[in-house]
Image (cartoon, rainbow, N blue to C red):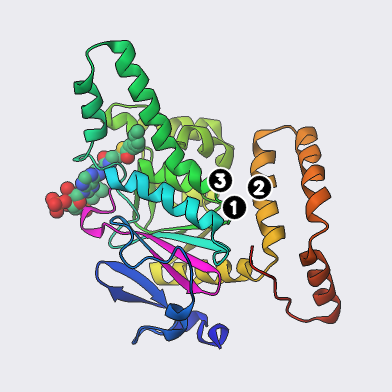
Amino acid sequence: MIRQLFRRNLLTPLANHSSEVYSPIAYRPSVAVMSITSSTNSANMYSTLSVNTVAPFVTHVTLNRPEKLNAMNRAFWGEIKECFQKLSDDPDCRTVVLSGAGRVFTSGLDLTDMSDFFDIIQSEQDIARKSKLFYAKVRDYQDSFTALEKCSKPIIAAIHGACIGGGVDLISASDIRYCTQDAFFQIKEVEIGLAADVGTLQRLPKAVGNDSIVRELAYSCRKLPSDEAKSLGFIGRIFPDKESMMNAAIDLATVIANKSPVAVQGTKINLNYSRDHTVDDSLEYMARWNSTMLQSEDLVKAAMAQMSKDKPTFSKL
Ligand SMILES: CC/C=C\C=C\CC(=O)SCCNC(=O)CCNC(=O)[C@H](O)C(C)(C)COP(=O)(O)OP(=O)(O)OC[C@H]1O[C@@H](n2cnc3c(N)ncnc32)[C@H](O)[C@@H]1OP(=O)(O)O
């Protein structure tokens, strides 16, 4: 039933206060969507995010301060970390779609809410003591986006309009990146007087594989248009508008959610491990991983379903 409702042309954004809830049926709150339970679903749990289950085992996380172009304020950094840590452990979530409400994906760090840093400057006189507090704060901010990489579920970032500064750090920690034609990406940190420090310089070069362009973008703050981002391999697919992008992202998330969660989560963990280790180390890690996971009931279920051309159902993980 839900799958029938969830046809591409019926998936339309619903207005829900300031957030955007994508529902299979545009003109009324979908009973099908809202009846799916998830321990991470939140009507008002966060002030900067909205979290909804939009299909079985598919969670939609929305950056939800549209009036401030989803600028990343002090609350955001704690909320995004907590949200993805919870989703990682939530058996009702197998895939996540991450998008932004309103005109743009995000305008990056909230330039009016940098009290975390000013507080440190004022709290200590001595440079060594200040440095120690700054170090801990930067590591803490880094952990907020590393939570996406460590989340055991694949994350599909769906970007429209501007994706600036911290936005590039954020999506660099995602698994799959879709965007609209009008999207652009800007490593803007140098323009506000700092070296990007929460993941762009570490993850983007590995996603793009063109050191010269990465350096050009990072030193100059040039806006990277969507078509160039795709040609670099940073973006997987471009869509004419946000609605078609969201439909495709949720369709893909649904396809992934129907696969064995043991296999999908093991694939994410091993892809991340291989990116950061030698082939030999990664093969060893894989062998150790599968020495356990090959014993999973999912393998038998999936193989039998292939043979009988049935759709397998997998237990929660
Ligand atoms: C440890 C450190 C961790 C992370 C560090 C990250 C670094 C960065 O993110 S660097 C990038 C910082 N961001 C920026 O420099 C972008 C600033 N914004 C803009 O340049 C513009 O807003 C725009 C994105 C080009 C859009 O312009 P426009 O369409 O004209 O909209 P506005 O009227 O400017 O904005 C609407 C509304 O949003 C507020 N706002 C926008 N961006 C931010 C922001 N980054 N921080 C705080 N507030 C922002 C803007 O002030 C407006 O609010 P009003 O109340 O309506 O005035």
Residue name at image x 43 percent, y 36 percent: 142
**Magenta includes 60?**
yes
Q: How many marks?
A: 3
**Magenta includes 317?**
no
122 is higher (above) or lower (below) than 67: above
Disc ID at residue 150:
3
- The residue identified by callout 2 is 269
* Kind of residue indicated by mark 3: Lys
| Label 2, ligand 1: CB separation under 8 Å | no
What element does badge 3 sit on? helix
Disc ID at residue 168:
none
- The residue identified by callout 1 is 152
**Pointers 3 and 2 in contact (C-beta within 8 Å):** no
Residue name at image x 43 percent, y 47 percent: 81
The magenta segment is 51-72
Q: Could one spot residue 236 in this view of the protein? A: no
206 is higher (above) or lower (below) than 185: above
Pick the residue in front: 79 or 209. Answer: 79
137 is higher (above) or lower (below) than 101: above
